[in-house]
Image (tube, rainbow, N blue to C red):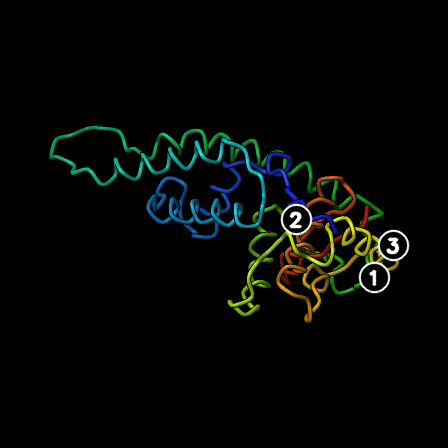
Amino acid sequence: MSNEIYKIKMDVFEGPMDLLIHLIRKAEVDIYDIPIALITSKFLSYIDWMKKMNIDFAGDFLVMAATLTQIKSKMLLPVHEGDEDEDPRMEIIRPLDEYLHMKSVAEQLYQRNLLGQDTFIRKSDNKDFLPHDGDEIIQVGLFDLIDAFQKILDKIPAEHKIDLTSDRISVQDRISEIVNILEEQGSVIFTEIFSDNCTKNEIIVTFLAILEMIKLSLIQAVQHIQTGIIRIFYL
């Protein structure tokens, strides 16, 4: 394999607002009462993680990080009695609220299309995954995939270092392997794509291959809300 480092461009997936929403939902807090210190710390951690994984993100993420850091600093300033200054968090809450509204409308439209796709049901070989009355199937976002992937990485011994330039298998090779699996099965549970005896590098290359395939519209990742199962479907 070539020792050229493989990069995944972030801007074709989701932006900084999506990451912010993801973090707020994970923290289970109200949008109007964001724990800015916690969210800022988590946001910066994601940026560091994406750098480590060689995910090329847009400058908007750095702008958002700077904005959050600035708001965090303002929140630390003493509040004097009688001051009627606006909550510094409103700088991010207003655009976030608008973005959430637009995203909600888009997700509702997507949900209708998703449940109406005959191919979605036909390609599944796992009957337990098929939606029953009252069940929900949602499209999986990039940061949900990152969280699921991080759980897999956490099982690998810490002493196993990451070196994306010395891997035995390339992203393109792994894409071909995943395509072969999906052509035979139609779909596969996300965690089952990662073999137990893979090295940390091979696991990372597999994840990058999945991201590349999503970008190329070769696959779709969806989650069964009731079970939490993430499944990859071949399009």
**The C terminus, quarter of image:** top right
Query: Real-space Cα distance between discs 2 and 3?
Result: 23 Å
Q: Is residue 123 left or right of residue 148?
A: right
Q: Position of residue 156 (x, y in %)?
A: 57, 68
Q: Amino acid at mark 3?
A: Glu
Tell me what residue is drawn at x 46 percent, y 33 percent.
97
Residue at image position (39%, 46%) is 39
> Could you say which is closer to the camera, residue 205 or residue 183?
205
Mark 1 or 3: the one toward you: 3
Mark 3 residue crowding within 10 angstroms, few (<14) / some (14–19) / many (20+): some
Give the residue displayed 62% in from the left and 53% down from the top: 164
* Mark 1: secondary structure: loop
Disc ID at residue 138: 2
- Relative placement, left or right, of 60 versus 106 is left
Looking at the image, is 82 positioned above or below residue 146? above
Residue 49 image offset from top left, x and y in percent: 50, 50
Percent coordinates x, y for residue 36 in the rendering: 34, 43
Q: How busy is the neighbourhood of tag 2: few (under 14 within 10 Å), some, or many (20 plus)?
A: some
* Number of the label disc, if any, that sits on residue 146: none
Instruction: Determine which residue is flagged by label 1.
Output: 125
Q: In terms of image quadrants, where is residue 83?
A: top left
Labels 1 & 2 near each other (Cβ < 8 A)? no
Q: Is residue 40 left or right of residue 53?
A: left
Query: Which residue: 48% across, 44% down?
Result: 47
Q: Which mark is residue 183?
A: 3
The answer for how far apart the CA atoms under marks 1 and 3 are is 12 Å
